Every structure is written in C-alpha cells, then in structure tokens.
Amino acid sequence: MQNKESFTRWLPLVELTFAVFVFNTSEFMPIGLLTDIATDLNISEARAGLLISVYAWVVAIMSLPLMIMVSKMELKRLLLSIIALFVVSHVASAFAEGYYTLMLSRIGVACAHSIFWSIAPPLAVRTVPDGKRALGLSAIATGSSVAMVVGLPLGRVVGLYVGWRMTFLSIAIISALIFVFILMVFPKLQSRGKFAFKELPTLLHNRVLLGVFIMSVLFATAHYTGYSYIEPFLGKVAAMAPDTVTLVLIVFGGSGMFGSIAFSKYYMSNRRRFMLAVTLGPALCMLLLQAAATGMAYILAVCILWGAMATAFNIAFQDNTIRFAPEHATSIAMSIFSGIFNLGIGSGAYIGGLVVSRLSIEYIGYAGGAIGMIATLYLTLRYFPNMRRREAADIKQK
C-alpha cells in the first residue's frame, strides 16, 4: 500500500516530464522538415525557415507578458489550458492550407510554449516529496535533453514516411493523451502570486548573470545559424540521400548524450576550461562544416562533436544561471534564460535564412562559426573575469 502511494506521488512529475519532452520536440521538429514543408507549400527553404525564427521570437518576447497575465490562475487549470492550446494549434498546423495559416498555428504553439516554460520548473518542485527538489528539476532537464536529442530526427523519420502534416498531427494526439493523464493525476496547486517586475533590475545588475544571458543569446544565434539549415545542407552540399540525411541527424541528436556524460564527469573539476571547450568547439565544427561535406566520415565526426558540445554548453550555462541568481529569483532568472536563448534561436535561423537566400547554403557553417568565435571572445575577455570577481567576493562574505 505504501509503495502504491509512493508511486502515485511521483505520477505528476512523470506526466510533467513527458509534457516537457513533447513541447521541446515540437520546437525542434520543423528543422528536419524544412525541405518537405517548402516543397508542399511551394515556398523557398529560407521562407520555411522563418517558421523556426518566428516561433522562437514569440517565445522570447511573450514569456514574461503572458505569464503576468495568467499568474493568478490555479496552476493545474493553467497547465491544462496551455496543453489544450498546444493540441488545437498542432491540429491547425496539420491541416494548414497555406504558409500563413501554418505560421499562425505555430504562433499559437509558441504562446503555449512560452507560458509552459515559465511554470514547469516551479511545478516540478511543488509536486515532488519534501527534500526531492533537485530530483524534480533534474527530471525536467532530462525531458528537455531527450527532446533535444531525438526531437529533430524523430520528426524527420515520421515526416519522411508519412509526411510533415502527420508529424504535427501525431504531436497533437500524444499531447491530448498527456492532457487526459494530467487531468486525472495532477493535484490542484494555487498560484503564489504575480512575478514582481522590481526583481528584474536586480537580476540585470548582476554582472555574471547578465553575462550568462549574453553568452546564451550569442551561442544560440551561432548554433542555430548552422543547425536550422543542416537538413538541406546535408542533402544539397554533402549530396546525401534522404535516408542518409536522416541517419546523420539521428547521430547528431544522439551525440548530445555524450555532452551530458562529459558534463557530469568533467564540469565540476574545471568549470572554466569546460565552458571554454564547449563554446569554442561548436564554432570550430561549423567553420569546418563545408570542408567536412566531402566525406561521410568527416561530416559524422563534425556533427558528433558539434552536437555533444552544444548540449554540454546548454547544461553548463543553466547551471551558471542557477548558481549566480539570487535564491528567491531562480525561477525568474531561468525564465529570462529561456526567453533569451529562444531569441538566439530565432536570430540564428533568420541569419541562416539570409545566408541561404543571398549567398549560398554552403556558407551557413562559416556564418555560424564566426558568431561562435565572437561568443568565445566574450567568454574569455568579459565573462570569466566577472565570474572570478564574483566568486572572490562570495568567498570573502563567507
């Protein structure tokens, strides 16, 4: 009986973790479907890429305003409302008759996404047993990481065999099932009140935390300049067959697991060296992307290293956000981190689209790599010195 009660207590966190996986999978899936969407809607790949950019920008811009609007709602009701919007928007995506209809439906998904990521970490903490806060947050991070690993290749596989519309419809069906389970097992949780805007200036005066936000937008812009167009790059520049492109995307996504393992083993022993490696590494990989397109072994090596280090970067700087934010404002800091990272995703996809449309798709790696080198310079010249001063001040206070 006790085991049953213990299992039941963890069900809300399990459902929340599945929801995190589905939300993040939905964000990354269109990257692997760009060519199919562009062909079906008779638009350019650069224009199709705006679906990624606009989605990310909506999440970045609307996270705080939308959260303030709904901050007094009971949290279970709010969560169910978000998932309902998510389901309806994906059904609309699946049956979109044209480009603008699809864009509007993706904006609906982005609005749901922006609120979801503002409440998911606090919900995880409040639904787990006392003393298990870290485990709750770890589960959310796991759902997000798995989505980043398999989201793009999974969408690509489904899209390749049954079409991109069925991919969106599949997400709607899975999300509807999650809605039912949350309705059944999730407890009612009262809101703890509105976000206080007066907290924001304090956070932004924290130089290390501000540096985290700058690093996140620079890195995300660099990464998604190349990553957003990796599927057409592999097909056109590397001249790979569709099945081979899918294989490389799966390997790319799966390599994120190596980044997670590397983080757990090496990050704490030398945090600065680790952060330098995972910032500089993806930039170098993107700069080598065109050269690597001459052979399957080369492109696999570049994609594995790039994917592993990009995942490690994300985890490392989430840790820095939590580490350097005031304890009472951690959730607000994470909300800003998510919004700014999505701003970088949108900017990267947009810059990649400009490179594709005005130059050539073969140059996306150079564009992303150049921005990545700027991020590396900021890390070494500004972020690390501020980090050292903050850590020295903390030691003196103790």
Image (cartoon, grey):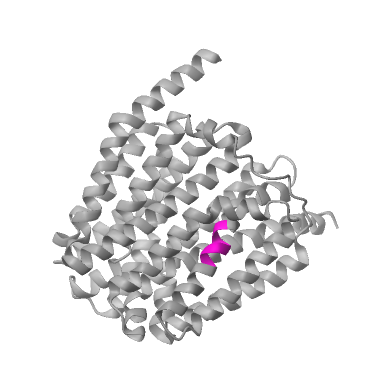
State the image coordinates of residue 160 (x, y, percent, origin top left).
Answer: 38, 82
Front-most of 58 and 144? 58
- In this view, which residue lies farthest toward the right? 1
Q: Which residues are magenta?
A: 109-114
| Residue at image point 41% right, 80% down | 159
Whether the magenta-drawn stretch holds residue 308 is answered as no
Q: Quadrant of residue 100?
A: bottom left
Question: Where is the N terminus found, in terms of image quarters?
Answer: bottom right
30 shown above or below 117: below
In the image, what residue occupies the spot 47% across and 17% down?
393
The residue lying at 53 percent from left, 44 percent from top is 334
Residue 288 location, x and y as percent? 18, 55
SS majority, magenta: helix
Say which quarter of the image contains residue 50.
bottom left
Q: Report whether residue 120 is seen.
A: no
Please indicate whether residue 107 sits to the left or right of residue 88 in the image: left
In-front residue for pair 111/167: 111
Q: Nearest the camera: 385 or 260? A: 385
Q: Is residue 121 left or right of residue 42?
A: right
Question: Residue 148 at what x, y percent from top left?
Answer: 44, 60
> Residue 266 at x, y = what percent?
40, 38
Compared to 314, does 297 lie above or below? below
Q: Is residue 48 visible?
A: yes
